[in-house]
Image (spheres, helix red, strand yellow):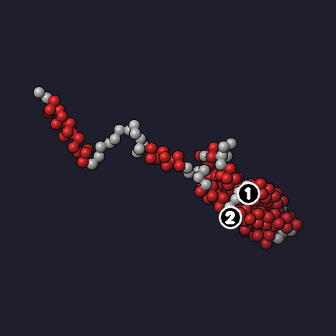
Amino acid sequence: MVPSNYMGYFQAASQAAAALLGLLFVVIALRPGRIVGTHANPVAKRLAASTFTGLVDAFFVSLLALIPGHKLGVGAAIMAVLSLYHTLRLHLGLRGARHIVIFVMSLLAYGLQLCLAVAFVLNPHDAGLVSDLTFTLIFAFAVALTRAWQLLQSGAVTTADEGHAATSGDGDPGAPAAASGPAASRLPASRRLRQDHQQP
């Protein structure tokens, strides 16, 4: 059983995970071809999938904790196994010290979650296991947010096309040049002078 004093935490965790999942879907919808398309950047695709894995794990574990009964241990164990599988499949193709650190953090977070979930199944009235499980959700959020930040820095979301579009109007050779400054003040007078010379 989950103690009642943890219900507020799991409610806040589920709402936060749902909100972050919604933002992730918005980002993917803005750049579908660069993140999840057939020609998407493989690094960006793995980063998005890793972010999704961490948020889904935190979301469903928090929801299961809100259901009365003894469903938290089994559900958390299933989510931990699925998260470990996806983490191993996604992170093996990434290179770099930063990716290795996040990979180790992910394995520790989901591995600890699996151990605590199994222990909670065996001891469903141990409130200390619930307290420890809440920290694994914090680790899952940390991994997901770190991956989301790396996704933003990968260039798949903000590209050079936006900067080109912002400056294309200023450097368009076909656009008429607007007179400004002293030239603009002399333009009407020059027109009047030309008109005076053309008159007989």
Q: At 41% across and 41% down in the image, what residue appears?
A: 172
How many marks can you see? 2
Quadrant, the C terminus:
top left
Q: At 55% across and 49% down in the image, what residue appears?
A: 159
The tag on residue 97 is 2
What kind of residue is marked 2?
Answer: Ala
> Are discs 1 and 2 less than 8 Å apart at CB?
no
Residue 38 horizontal/vertical position (percent): 68, 42
Q: Helix or strand or loop: what does disc 2 sit on? A: helix
* Residue 37 found in image quarter: top right
Q: At 73% across and 57% down in the image, what residue appears?
A: 91
* Residue 176 found in image quarter: top left
Residue 106 horizontal/vertical position (percent): 74, 62
Side of 2 relative to 97 (left or right): right
Residue 70 horizontal/vertical position (percent): 83, 61
Q: Is residue 35 above or below residue 100?
A: above
- For the question of whether residue 109 can be seen, the reply is no
What kind of residue is marked 1?
Answer: His
105, 18: nearer the viewer: 105
Side of 95 relative to 162 (left or right): right
Q: Which residue is mark 1?
A: 91
